[in-house]
Image (spheres, grey):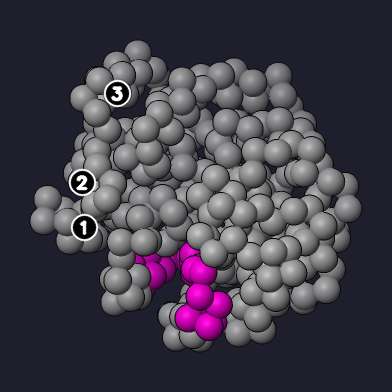
Amino acid sequence: MSLRKLLAGTGVALVTPFKASTHVDFDALGRVLDHVIDNGAEYVVTLGTTGETPTLDTEEKIDIIHYTCEKVNERIPVVVGIGGNNTREVMENLQSFPLEKAVAVLSASPYYNKPSPEGIFQHYKNLASASPKPVILYNVPGRTGSNINAETTLRLAREVDNISGIKEASGNMIQCMHILRDRPDDFLVVSGDDHLTLPLIACGMDGVISVAANCFPADFSNMVRHSLRGDFEAARPLHYKCLEGNDLLFAENNPAGVKAFLYEMGIIENVLRLPLVPLSETVQQKVKAFLGKLIINI
């Protein structure tokens, strides 16, 4: 099965729960996994930005991959995030991390050093040659400081066999439409922006890798499924039902917002690792109020 078919729908960009000591809370991670799987998510993505990977050491990342794959137990596909701005180090991680049970790797474009389009192309070409699994590009210029333009995405899609998709979080609808118009038939294109998921699916995207689906997976996944069927009359009410929640998720920081929601839902502790901190009390109260008035499947 092509990755485009296998990963159509809603993928969840998982949080990494921490105990008060800031050690990884694997019991809480298990609760998150059961919550999103039981409520209809199509797959999960571990070790993404939402998982606070910049603050995890290598041993913790390996333990999280092992635990996630064992807990999921083939109920749904697992994608593993492996990225960075040191191409050689990322290639080494692709060779050494336990990816046997993963279906693909999600790799954010290099941050901070701001490579040219040719540098981005060569970075991903080298990652693809080292990866034992298909590679999904991740374009998130708001975090990385550089954009994977449509031309580079399409060049990678056409010229590099092991590049199989992109998570597009540029927020640039025109760029997304150029990719969707000209992509190869089997090239996966998913939204990396919860707010824009419905209109991007209307343009032709295959789904989303979502932060919001950590906390309201049933409503969000159903919205995506309706959209993929072209039933926007059914999708729109769910889109607007989640809209204020999406606003709150990103009001101050991701994953501070999603962790605040999951804490109020009794699934995890509200603990982040520095330099991230929990939401301000003002926004936390808005999260609590939103959950109090919203009928969601939790």
The Cα atoms of the two marked residues, 1 and 3, are separated by: 24 Å
Residue 105 is left or right of residue 35, and the answer is right
Residue under label 2, please give it.
Answer: 271
Q: Position of residue 194 (x, y in %)?
A: 55, 36
The Cα atoms of the two marked residues, 1 and 2, are separated by: 10 Å
Mark 2 belongs to which amino acid? Answer: Val
Q: Quadrant of residue 120?
A: bottom right
Decide which of tag 1 and tag 2 comes sooner along the chain. Answer: 1
Looking at the rendering, the stretch of residues picked out in magenta corresponds to 64-91
Residue under the image location 42 percent in, 62 percent down: 47
Q: Residues within 10 Å of mark 2 (few under 14, many from 20)?
A: many
Q: Nearer the viewer, residue 19 or 251?
A: 251
Residue 292 visible in the current orientation: no
Q: Nearer the viewer, residue 39 or 161?
A: 161
- Give SS at disc 1: loop
- Give SS at disc 3: helix
Mark 1 belongs to which amino acid? Answer: Asp
Residue under the image location 21 percent in, 25 percent down: 281
Whether the residues at callouts 1 and 3 have beta carbons within 8 Å, the answer is no
Q: Position of residue 43 (x, y in %)?
A: 53, 54
Decide which of tag 1 and tag 3 comes sooner along the chain. Answer: 1
Residue under label 1, please give it.
Answer: 25
Q: Residue furthest right?
A: 182
Q: Is residue 1 above or below residue 205?
A: below
Residue under label 3, please give it.
Answer: 283
Q: Residues within 10 Å of mark 1 (few under 14, many from 20)?
A: some
Residue under the image location 30 percent in, 71 percent down: 57
Q: Position of residue 218 (x, y in %)?
A: 48, 35
Residue 103 is left or right of residue 217, and the answer is right
Residue 150 is left or right of residue 110, and the answer is right
Q: Residue furthest left?
A: 21
Whether the residues at callouts 1 and 2 have beta carbons within 8 Å, the answer is yes
